[in-house]
Amino acid sequence: MSAIATTSQLNRSIGFYESTLGKKVVMAVTGVILFGYVLGHLIGNLQIYSPDPQQINHYAHFLHSHAVLLWVVRCGLLASVVLHITASGQLWLLKRAARPEAYIKKDDVPASYAARTMIWSGPIIAAFVIFHVLHLTVGSVLTLNTLPDGDMDVRTNVIMGFQHPAVAIFYIVAMALLCMHLYHGLWSMFQSLGVNHPRYTPIIKKFAAAFAWFVAIGNISIPVAVLAGVLTLQ
């Protein structure tokens, strides 16, 4: 009986996901998870500005000292990214099939531009994340430095990495795309969940823009500070 109930529940879940609403809900839920990660990652990155040069290394040591929890979070993030991109691509294909010829409509220029680039900015950001991991986690791009105790010297690796203009420019471009992606994704997420009202939508859009700019400026400031000589090796 329990096996039948489990199968029935699984079939209902699959059926729900196959609907447009189901895909939007998956995008919204995974979007919340990814937004939380982006904010947390930024807070961690900004510790490179701490008066204590080793602060960001202490932070990295704290994360890696909880290896099991760290890998659970990583797996959850990976699953969220895969589901988010998959649902996004499927929605784009459904929209394209339902309306093969775009109609003329005057939209808010920043919102419409962000919407048009969503299908491309997502995969580009995903490619950047892979590059970022290969660069600062795996060490396949540049040789990584370690501290005397064997822990990764995150501060040195970040600064040495961004001293290469190509790496810094790629990072800046990716963060600009992330800004547009976050802006459109955040307020459209509320619409997907049914929060769409003339009184609240403008406020949500302003919040989405502020959040996106905060994340982009915070992250972009690091390679700019390195190239400008504000952040240096000590």
Image: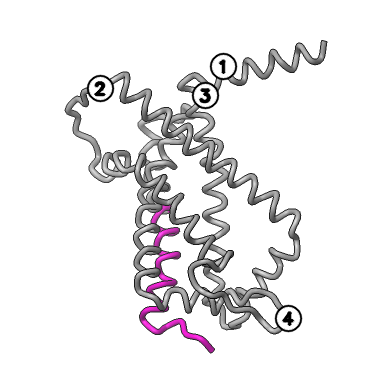
Q: How far, Cα to Cα, is label 2 from label 4?
A: 60 Å
Other residues around mark 4 within 10 Å, as few (<14) / some (14–19) / many (≥20): few
Mark 3 or mark 4: whose residue is earlier in sequence? 3
- Tell me the residue that label 1 is attached to: 15
In the image, the segment drawn in magenta is: 211-234
Secondary structure of the residue carrying tag 1 is helix
At which x and y percent is residue 185?
42, 41
* Helix, strand or loop under label 3: helix
Q: Nearer the viewer, residue 209 or 228?
A: 228
- Which residue occupies the extreme bottom position in the image? 234
Identity of the amino acid at label 3? Gly
Residue type at tag 4: Asp
Foreground mark, 1 or 4? 4
- The residue at which mark 3 appears reads as 22
* Front-most of residues 50 and 128: 128
Percent across and percent down for residue 145 are: 59, 78
Amino acid residing under circle 1: Gly
The disc label shown at residue 149, or none: 4
